[in-house]
Amino acid sequence: MTRFGEFLARRHINKSSLSKRTGLTTQRINDLCNKANSRPMAFEVYLVAKAIGADLNEINLFLFGDLELREVNQEKSTDSK
């Protein structure tokens, strides 16, 4: 189960009714819940948030809160003119 699936399961969301409210197919919702390689698009997360009355930031933090920026090693350019 994906993080998206975990979020919906914790809230006891019925996928069929979510599909009807958002316009997303039940297959797409199932893919987002079960397939590790499926990634939710921003509009899908937004529609789900509206449909279940959740805060969009709460969903985004749950889904993507573990992401971190890469450490970038900035070196001075030694280009000479």
Image (cartoon, helix red, strand yellow):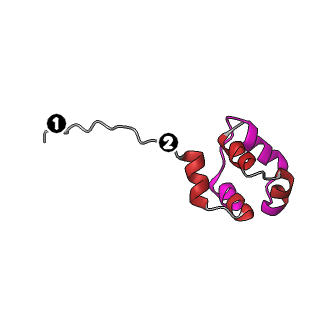
Q: Is residue 37 magenta?
A: yes
- Which quadrant, please, contains the N terminus? top right
- Between 4 and 9, the residue placed more toward the observer is 9
Percent across and percent down for residue 26 are 84, 49
User: How many neighbours does mark 1 have within 10 angstroms: few (below 14), some (14-19), or many (20 or more)?
Assistant: few
Percent across and percent down for residue 33 are 74, 42
Cα separation, mark 1 vs mark 2, equals 33 Å
Between discs 1 and 2, the one toward the N terminus: 2
**Residue at x 80% of width, y 60% of height:** 23
Q: Where residue 63 is drawn, which disc sits there?
A: none
Identity of the amino acid at label 1? Thr
Kindly report the secondary structure that dominates the magenta region of the rendered protein: helix
Nearer to us of marks 1 and 2 is 2
**Residue at x 78% of width, y 48% of height:** 29
On screen, residue 55 above or below 68:
below
Quadrant in the picture for residue 57: bottom right
**Residue at x 73% of width, y 52% of height:** 11
Percent across and percent down for residue 53 are 70, 64
- Which quadrant, please, contains the C terminus? top left
Identity of the amino acid at label 2? Leu
Answer with left or right where residue 21 lies relative to residue 60: right
Q: Is residue 80 magenta?
A: no
Answer with left or right where residue 56 lies relative to residue 79: right
**Residue at x 69% of width, y 40% of height:** 38
Quadrant in the picture for residue 27: top right
Count the marks: 2
Judging from the image, what secondary structure is the residue with disc 1 in? Answer: loop
- Label 1 belongs to which residue? 78
Where does the magenta region start and end? 21-47
- Label 2 belongs to which residue? 67
